[in-house]
Image: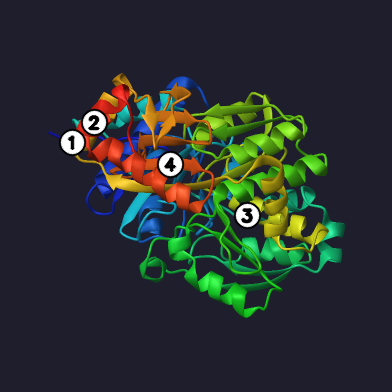
Amino acid sequence: MVDPIRFGTSGWRGTLADEITGPRVRALAAAVAEWLIASGSGHRVWVAHDTRWLGPTLAATAAGVLSARGLAVSRVRSPVATPVVTHALGRGRADAALLFTASHNPPGDHGVKVIGAGGASVSPTEGRRLERGVARVLRGGTIAPALPPRRWIDPRPTYLRSLRAQLDGDALRAGRVAVVYDAMYGAGAGLCDTALRDAGVRVAAFRTASDPRFGGSAPDPTPAHLGALVRRVRDGGGHWLGLANDGDADRLAVVDRDGTVLSESEALALLVDHLARTGRARGGLAISLATGTLVERVAREHGIAVERHPIGFKYLSAALRRGRVSVAGEESGGFALGAHGIDKDGILAACLVAELAARDPRPLRNRLRAFERRYGVRACGRTALICDDTRRIRMESLRRSPPDRVDGRRVRAVDLRDGIRLELADGFVMARSSGTEPRIRIYAEAPGRTALRRRLEAGHRLLDDGSRAARGRRGGVG
C-alpha cells in the first residue's frame, strides 16, 4: 500500500528521501497540473525553492512534469523567500506556484507549499483535492515525460519596490535605527537586510550564508535558537534591535535592546498598535485561536474589530482576501498587511518593527509595560508533545468531554474548531495536533511567566494523566 501525502497547516512536509522523494514530487506536480487544467484556474505556474538540500533538484523535477502537461512554467531564480512568491501571485503574475521549503522545520525535512492565484496557500478543500490526485497517480496513474522549462524570472526587485511603498521612509531615515539581523542561513538573507538598508536602517547581518544544514539546528526563530542574536544585541550596549526570520522568511522574531526575546503575541500587539496609530489598520484584525488576548485588547481599544480563526495562516489569508480585515497575525510569528499581500511576510514585519523603533527610540519593553498597566500582565507560550496513539485517544476524549476546570480555574468557554481551546478568566489553554509535524502542541496564556509555566504543565496533564483528565468534568485538572 502506498502511503498518501497529507497537506498540513502550511503545505506538505516530511523527511527528505523518506516521505519527500522524487517520485512523490512528480506525482504532486501531476496532480497540480490536473487541478489547474480541470478547474480552469489558469496555466501559468512558477516553481521555486529555498536553501534546503536538493531544492534545485526537486524544483527541476516538478517543473519538468508541469511543462510536459502543457502548462507555462517559469523557474524563479532561487533560493527565494516565500513572501516574494506569494506577493507576486497576489499581483496576478502567475496562477499557481510550487515552492519547495519546509519553513522552520529541521534540516533533514523538506516540503512544498502550493500557492494559489490570490497569493496564499491553497484552501483546505483544494488541498484535499490535490491529496486525492496524488493518490491516483501513486496507484498507477501516468506521468508524461518531463520537459525543461524555458523561462527564468526574478521577482525580487518588484517585491522590494512594493515593500518600500508600505513604509514611512522619512521616519526610518530620520530615526537612525540600528538592527542586528539574523537570517538563520535561510532565504531571507540578502533580501530582508537589503530592504532594511534601502529604508535607511543601519544593519549588521549574520548567518547569511546559504547553508542547507542551517548551522546544525532548525531555522526556527524561537528563544531556543536565538542565543547568538541575543548575545550580539547585548554586546551592542542597548543601541541595537534584533530581528530574525525563519528558513523561508515568512515569520519574524524580535529581540529588544536589552536582549529580551519578545513573545510573538507581544510583537504582534506592538505592530497592531503602530499600524492603528499611523492609520494603516483601518479594517478589522484576524488572529488565530492560539494568539494571546493582549493583541485583541490593543486592537479593540483602537476600535478595530477582531475575529479568531483556526491555526494555519490560510484561514487568516481568506479573511484578508474577502476584505473583512486589513491586518492578520498569529501565535507563531506570522503577520500580513492586506495592502501589501494576504500571506504572512516576515520581511515586511521586520521593516515595520524597525519603523516603529524609528518613530519612538525607547526600548520596546517600555511600550509593553504601558500595555500591562492598561490591560494587565499576559504571558503566552507553547510547547509540544510527541503524538502517540495514547495521546491521540485522550485528545478525542477531551473534545467529547471538556473539563470544567483547568489549572484551578473555571473554564468559561470551549472552542472545538481546531483541537480544543479552553478559555479561562485570566487566559486560556489550547491543545491541537500539529499540521506539520507528529506533535500535539500545547498553547497557553496566563498572568505572568510563573503562572504560564504552571498552565502549560496543566495542559500536559490533560493529555498525559488520563485519570485526572477524566475527572476534569467532576472537579478539576491541573
Q: In the image, 186: left or right of 279?
A: left
What residue is rendered at 77% in x and 47% in y? 166
Query: Dot 1, crowdedness within 10 Å: few (<14), some or many (≥20)?
Result: few
- The answer for how far apart the CA atoms under marks 2 and 3 are is 39 Å
Residue wearing tag 4: 443
- The answer for how far apart the CA atoms under marks 3 and 4 are is 25 Å
Query: Disc 2 vs disc 1: Cβ atoms closer than 8 Å?
Result: yes
- Point out the frontmost of discs 3 and 4: 4
Question: Looking at the picture, does residue 322 appear above or below residue 202?
Answer: above
- The answer for how far apart the CA atoms under marks 4 and 1 are is 20 Å
Q: Amino acid at mark 4?
A: Tyr
Question: Looking at the picture, does residue 263 appear above or below residue 326?
Answer: below
Measured from the top left, where is residue 51 in percent x and y? 44, 61
- The answer for how far apart the CA atoms under marks 2 and 1 are is 6 Å
State the scheme by which the image is colored: rainbow
Is any atom of residue 141 visible in this view? no
Query: Disc 2 vs disc 3: Cβ atoms closer than 8 Å?
Result: no
What residue is rendered at 50% in x and 54% in y? 248
- The answer for how far apart the CA atoms under marks 1 and 3 are is 40 Å
Element type where label 1 sits in the image:
helix
Residue wearing tag 2: 394
What residue is rendered at 37% in x and 65% in y? 217
Question: Looking at the picture, does residue 83 appear above or below residue 292?
Answer: below
Element type where label 4 sits in the image:
strand
Residue wearing tag 3: 347
- Point out the frontmost of discs 1 and 3: 1
Work out which quarter of the rendered image holds the N terminus and state it. top left
Query: Disc 1 vs disc 3: Cβ atoms closer than 8 Å?
Result: no
Of callouts 2 and 4, which one flags the residue occurring earlier in the amino acid sequence? Answer: 2
